[in-house]
Image: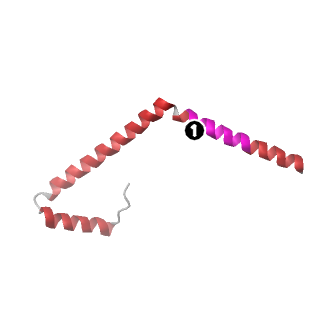
Amino acid sequence: MFDIGLLELFLVLVIGLVVLGPERLPEVIKSVTRSIEWIKRTVTSTKEEISKNIGLDEIYQDLRNEEILKKSETDVHQNKED
């Protein structure tokens, strides 16, 4: 999700430790982790619901079928020229 390396993560933890202190840091980390997981679940379920409602799978299939049809027509025209 986020492109965070080990060094950046360590730096954030050290800053958090200095700012929040050792007593509150684990509590804050748990809270942030729960919030991120909740956001991920919400976004995923919303995307799935929208996809179901507008028939996104059918649209993708139609687009794929059109691509295959165009490719086959191009191949037929190329074969006739040879």
Between 30 and 82, the one nearer to me in the picture:
82
Relative to 37, residue 65 above or below: above
* Residue at screen point 47% across, 35% down: 51
Residue 47, given in percent of the width and then of the height, sits at: 42, 39
The residue at which mark 1 appears reads as 60
Q: Is residue 74 above or below residue 56?
A: below
Q: Position of residue 21 (x, y in %)?
A: 11, 63
Residue that sits furthest to the front in the current view? 54
- Disc 1 residue type? Tyr
Q: Residue at x 18, y 54 (%)?
A: 28
Q: Main secondary structure of the magenta part?
A: helix
Find the magenta span and give its range.
58-70
Residue located 47% across and 31% down the image: 52
Q: Position of residue 15 (x, y in %)?
A: 20, 67
Magenta-drawn stretch contains 75: no
Percent position of residue 66, x then y: 67, 39
Q: Secondary structure at mark 1?
A: helix
Left or right relative to 12: residue 17: left
Residue at the left extreme of this rendering: 23
Horizontally, is 54 left or right of 3 in the view?
A: right
Q: Residues within 10 Å of mark 1 (few under 14, many from 20)?
A: few
Q: Does residue 65 belong to the magenta stretch?
A: yes
Q: Is residue 32 left or right of residue 2?
A: left
